[in-house]
Amino acid sequence: MKSVVIEGKDQKVRVDEIELDDLREDEVLVKMGASGVCHSDYSIVDGTIPVNYPIVLGHEGAGIVEEVGQHVTTLKPGDHVVLIYIPQCGKCFYCTTGKPNLCETTSHTRTGALPNGHVPMKRGGEPIVQMAGIGTMSEYTIVHETSAISIDPEIALDKVALVGCGVMTGVGAVINTAEVEPGSSVAVFGSGGIGLNVIQGSKMSSANTIIAVDTNPLKLEFALQFGATHTVDASEEDPVERIREITGGRGADYTFEAIGNATVMRQAFESARRAGTVAVIGIAKADEELAIPASMLVRDEKRVLGSFYGSTRQRVDLPRLLDLYQSGDLNLDGLITQRYSIDDAQQAFDDLVAGKNARGVLVFDE
Ligand SMILES: [Zn+2]
Ligand SMILES: [Zn+2]
């Protein structure tokens, strides 16, 4: 089968022949339908997320179950599934205390091992890492049962794929992490695949003022389509000052950083009002530190929150997002601005880096 592989940091991605090991009792074989191209995939290409290369990319995908191991109880062949990049084991400390996005059985991106220790992908007989234990940029994948959730088969798989990462991460940061209140003001730094979903999550939460900040005019165009009421081109004006201006000098009630850059995180901190909430979504390089004025943290009572995977409760929230899509309250159609065949994976990454898409999606042959 074909998979998208990267051999090392800053290399081009390429499509290679990968084999799958025999299915184990707690695993599921999935024929992939679609895989989103997310900035976190590129973070493996440029080394922001450290991994053991080579690696099969992809962590935002959906497909159809072909075969299940004998101990699998939640899925059966023919089920349509969304894959989750943090498995939900249901048993660990975090799963049982309402934070399954931090599940302790997390698959090991460095080794490619599933939660059961198995590395199911091989190349030339040698084990190969699959990103987040799912490696969705592949015609087929083997995942642990806890990494797949059955969903409504009526929904096209390219739409389903998006809730696996980008949509959940963005909308979840608004609803689950920051808990944006109706009527409030929101500023979003970064209007890419995640930021656009922060914007549409804020709109769903009836935020009154939604300010999109980016340096790419095309992305600010997308932001308006997803509900932004104001746009700020940070290459032309100081976003902190502009956000204060728009919010009557006070600062925004909620600010979100959806890039992964400590300088921008500081801007998000400064543009939040007193007692405002700053939610950081973007994943910075491992050695990057965030400097914020220590006295302001206390005197202004700002709340700085990390938001990982939209603080998702995977098995509840992902099907719920798809319900919202079916009721017309969540825009997934408009997110997909380009579809690619697996052979055009490098083009998809080039377009990601150039900021051409709201979301590009690899679609696999039926
Ligand atoms: Zn992602
Ligand atoms: Zn768990």
Image (cartoon, rainbow, N blue to C red):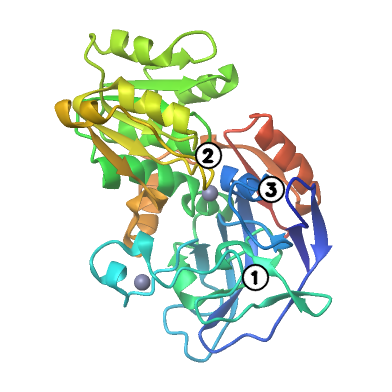
* Residue projecting furthest to the bottom: 70
Q: State the residue at coordinates (49%, 29%).
A: 191
The answer to whether the residue labelled 2 contacts the one labelled 3, judged by CB atoms less than 8 Å apart, is no
Element under disc 2: helix
Give neighbour class at mark 3: few <14, some 14-19, many 20+ (Cα, 10 Å).
many
Q: Quadrant of residue 211?
A: top left
Image coordinates of residue 8 in percent, x first then y, are 76, 54
Mark 2 or 1: the one toward you: 1
Element under disc 1: strand
Quadrant where the C terminus sits is bottom right
**N-terminal of the two: label 3 or label 1?**
3
Image coordinates of residue 111 in percent, x first then y, are 62, 70
Mark 3 or 1: the one toward you: 3
Residue 337: tell me if it is visible: yes
Q: Quadrant of residue 200?
A: top left
In this picture, residue 133 sits left or right of residue 87: right
In this picture, residue 178 sits left or right of residue 157: left
**N-terminal of the two: label 2 or label 3?**
3
| Amino acid residing under circle 2 | Asp
Give neighbour class at mark 2: few <14, some 14-19, many 20+ (Cα, 10 Å).
few
Q: Return the residue at label 2.
A: 333
* Disc ID at residue 3: none
Q: Quadrant of residue 101?
A: bottom left
Quadrant where the N terminus sits is bottom right
Image coordinates of residue 252 in percent, x first then y, are 27, 22
Q: Return the residue at label 3.
A: 45
Q: State the residue at coordinates (48%, 77%).
A: 145
Element under disc 3: helix
Front position in the image: 78 or 302: 302
Q: State the residue at coordinates (51%, 82%).
A: 116
Q: State the residue at coordinates (45%, 45%).
A: 167
Q: Return the residue at label 1.
A: 141
